[in-house]
Image (tube, coloured by chain):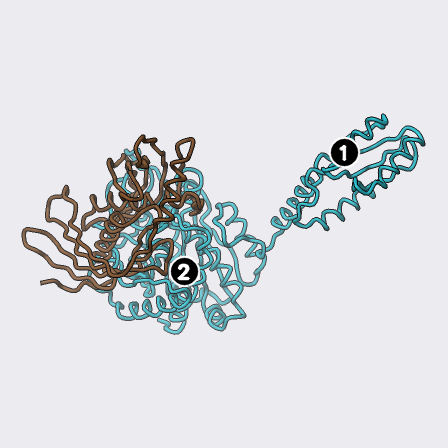
Amino acid sequence: AAMEVPLSHGLASRAAALATGYLCYRRGSPGRGLALRSLRRARRQDIDDVGHKYYLELELEDVLDKDSTVICTAEVLYHLGNKNIAPDVQFTLEGELKNTDEADNIFYNRIKSLEKELVAENIPDSHGNVPPEMEPIRLLAWVASGYVIWQNSTENTKFQLAQIKHVKQVKRSDEYLEFDYMILLHDMVSQEIIPWEMTVLWHPQHGVQVTQDSRQPKHA
Amino acid sequence: MKILLVFAALVAAAGSEQLFVGDQVLRITARDEEQIALLRVLGERAEMQVDFWRDPTRPHHPADLRVPFASLQAVKFFLESHSISYSIMIEDVQELLDEEKKNMTKSRRTERSTSTFDFASYHTIEEIYDWMDVLVDDHPNLISKIEIGRSYENRSLYVMKFSTGGSNRPAIWLDTGIHSREWITQATGVWTANKIAEEYGQDPSVTAILDSMDIFFEIIANPDGFVFTHSSNRLWRKTRSINAGSDCIGVDPNRNWDAGFGGSGSSSDPCSEIYRGPYAHSEREVKAIVDFIHGHGNVKSVISIHSYSQMLLFPYGYKRGPAAHHQELNELAKKAVSDLAAMYGTKYSYGSIADTIYLADGTTVDWTYDNGVKYSFTFELRDTGRYGFLLPSTEIIPTATETWPALLDIMVHVLENPY
């Protein structure tokens, strides 16, 4: 049987962060990032020989338009023992997400028409600034990091994207856009800053894909 | 001297409009009366829009002529074709005006006054330490600066003491920046210290508090780490002490206190961000506060400010069971969080450290609580992860503004519940 978990409880917020990351990966784009506005309900079930399952009700907001929100019901299953299996996440959304076709196409065409491959670093900078033209690059990293977060989360982690250290566009002959990112993930539980490299593919009609990713060694 | 007057008038008139971009001032020396006459004619040609800053009066006496950019070519051609010698005295009038304006504003900034400090920006340690002195100068009967010790790299650990007198009055302790990467906290600390100073004598609660209690405020509790976040690694958390036998530097100053020291809520690995240190109070930054609180003997509340997560927390972090005063602390946290949310709708969660985030041992507030400081709280300021430690400076003032009523709630409760 599933027991109610107090909403302010650390375990509930970790599961909520994981679900949000996964959702953002599945539904996000350079024109849309989804963030957790509030956790409305959380229940937990211990399933013998399987793992711990969380039933969550989340309210998510569009980071570019805080008034645009959706309700999400999610189930997160952390598998017992084996640390190499990503948690299972299922979700349903109530409500409409804003259409981002126009913004996505503008960004797509802008990058496609660059003469030199895009290169940037430290987004945001030390003061939290993100140049407006870098916002879609940042959102793309936010969405892609949702994949990395999902794949690497356990009940003892709570990851957030802390910063893009470096991003480099990779020219492609097909219609996709490709970017090599070096990101920093912050794990709230261990407080570690973890460098992570990821290769991200995107096309307005085909969504975001992380084709390669690897954890990098920490500096001393 | 006239040229200076003209120039000054221009500076005043120009304001921030770009009226003189590319304009030049030419110093012209006519060698005979004929050339003087020619210059006067030039001055009268309306379409040239030149104006003499120093009129052509006699041969061999220089005349200064401001020439708009659009007329430069024509005027120079005129002078050259009549063999009138000239030199360029000011190459770009607008540049000079801009320079002058910059110097004026710069001197305003170095003016020693708290009204010119930019609370909406992140500052360096030098700027904050300088500003502290200005704050003391501005409020000599209320604020003094004391040094409670030195950091590992021998930087001063400064505490602002707010006191209206008395002798060893019951006190409230506030600290920000113990984790150096949490920049919103030092920035909020600066704003809040200024707010306390402003509100004494104005706000009834602040006045009541300071009429019977003292406030001690350590705005930069980890100066070595703070300097490092500016010079090398923006995301540095710990102190900068060298760890024997390891390449890794630093101890987590919020795992180094002697409360549940050495448990599973901290690490024995010097490379870990939650490394507890070789022994409790090994860090000079921590020992200085420990010694201060012990030496003072009358501290009634400790509020340690961190980021991020939007939480208001109280003991314990090192164990799960409720603290003896759990109910009172919980109620007070609930009220504070509600008043914080009333400002801009920012939602905080609250509860004990262990329940709300994780098990953490050796924390500041667990130690202060176990050493007689009942009202021990930790804030985790904005945000919840969108920017995390890299919170935009545009959020400094909103964050400080909304946190203020929550701080006040706690301080008023402390005042009204002596023990």
- Give how far across and how far down residue A121 sits, in percent: 40, 37
The answer to whether marks 2 and 1 sit on the same chain is: yes
Q: Does residue A50 appear in this view?
A: yes
Q: Residue at x 31, y 44 (%)?
A: A204
Q: Which mark is residue A204?
A: none
Q: What color is chain A drawn in?
A: brown
Q: Position of residue A140 (x, y in %)?
A: 33, 44
Which chain's residue wears label 2? B
The outermost residue toward the right is B33
Q: Position of residue A111 (x, y in %)?
A: 39, 38
Image quarter in which the C terminus of chain A is found: top left
Seen from the viewer's position, the closer of residues A217 and A85 is A85
Residue B173 got which mark? 2
- Specify the label residue B89 is tagged with: 1
Q: CA distance from mark 2 to mark 1?
A: 61 Å
Any idea which chain is the cyan one in this picture? B
Work out whether mark 2 precedes mark 1 in sequence or the reverse, and give the earlier one: 1
Q: Is residue B249 above or below residue B215?
A: above
Whether label 2 touches label 1, CB < 8 Å: no
Residue ID at (44%, 49%): B157
Local packing at callout 2 (Cα closer than 10 Å; few below 14, some 14-19, many 20+) is many
Residue B99 left/right relative to B383: right
Report the side of B233 relative to A87 (left or right): right
**Residue appearing at x 38%, y 63% in the figure:** B299
Q: Position of residue B150 (x, y in %)?
A: 43, 46
